Image: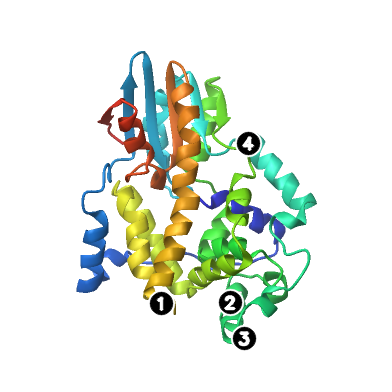
Amino acid sequence: MLRTLAFSLALLLPQMAFAACNGTDLRATLSARQSAELATELQDMPYPDGNHWVAHKGAQTIHLIGTLHLSDPRLTPIAARLAPVIASADLLLAEATEAEEAQLNEAMATRPELISLTSGPTLIELMPPEDWAELADAASKRGIPPFMAAKFQPWYLAMVLAMPPCVLATMQDGQHGLDKALLQIATENDVPAEALEPFDTLFTLMGQDTLEHQVALLRLGVIPAPQAEEMTATLVAQYFDEAHGAIMPLNRVVTQDLVDMPKAEFDAVFDNMVDTLLNQRNANWLPRITAAQGVTVVAVGAGHLGGTDGLLNMLADEGYALRRQPF
């Protein structure tokens, strides 16, 4: 869900060099406490599984496809299997199309206030010295000079630091996830594709928090690169297991042991992040999705599908009949 923002950073830093991803799946290494906390998080969660669902209501058919924004060779046969679904649709709705990415790239080059602190104190002044030192080291390991990191808006830097260096490398190299592949299939079959939100939606949602809250979010992003690689590998493994409902809960139980933050504060910051990145956007997308006519494909990050505030449950509440499909 953060691919577009991180890709934009990669465009800004064309000389960055990165190592290959070597993370391992963390699910087999969880402690008894972490496993119990994860089970509690998943208890009674609606629609936690399945990367392809179809929703029917009257004459309307909606295919919901959970995508992975990262590149992986296993996505190629998946895209081929989904090609007939895309080719026969009346409309493809995605988080962003080429038009929005072009708008984003232009804005990033001409509107520094989108990601930068253009006035007032930098992060060096906003953070305790020990926290800044840790952040500067994490930024350096991702090829971002600390003087540049100090001038980023905290929420934006948090998004970038949550990704290991190897992920940014694949984006810089032009490698793309399932979203791009499905959009290409739509283009080849003359199926219109539209974005579910304006290109600057995340900037608006994330930038509305106070600097104090953004700095708290930034502390969640300062995760050592090796652990960030393992968390990314775990996310990818969960995706191909079609276990998208467990992605954020597992992220929660693992991350809280990696950051020095009281649990109550951690939970508040994490919950706010999930609400902003997933729940608010799902709610904003729903009217656009239900207003579409005929056969519509909705291709969005798999994390948007499951849970009480996920797209599947919201469509069920709207009276749609849901059936899981092969992926």
Q: Residues within 10 Å of mark 2 (few under 14, many from 20)?
A: many
Query: Whole-Å distance between the Cαs marked 2 and 4?
Result: 33 Å
Do the CB atoms of the residues marked 2 and 4 lie less than 8 Å apart?
A: no
Asked which quadrant contains residue 251, the reply is: bottom left
The kind of residue tagged 4 is Glu
Measuring 29% from the left and 41% from the top, which residue is drawn there? 50
Residue located farthest toward the bottom when viewing the structure as drawn: 130
Do the CB atoms of the residues marked 2 and 1 lie less than 8 Å apart?
A: no
The kind of residue tagged 2 is Leu
| Secondary structure state at the residue bearing disc 3 | helix
Single out the mark in the foreground, 2 or 1.
1
Single out the mark in the foreground, 1 or 4.
1
* Mark 2 or 3, nearer chain start: 3
Residue 74, given in percent of the width and then of the height, sits at: 38, 46
The kind of residue tagged 1 is Pro
Q: In the figure, is residue 160 to the left or right of 34?
A: right
Asked which quadrant contains residue 54, the reply is: top left
Name the disc covering residue 135, or none.
Answer: 2
Measuring 73% from the left and 64% from the top, which residue is drawn there? 117
* Mark 2 or 4, nearer chain start: 4
Provide the residue designation for mark 1.
262
* Mark 2 or 1, nearer chain start: 2
User: Image height check: is 114 above or below 302?
Assistant: below
Query: Whole-Å distance between the Cαs marked 3 and 1?
Result: 19 Å
Residue located farthest toward the top when viewing the structure as drawn: 59
Q: Residue 71, can we see it?
A: no
Provide the residue designation for mark 4.
98
Single out the mark in the foreground, 2 or 4.
2
Residue closer to the observer: 274 or 232: 274
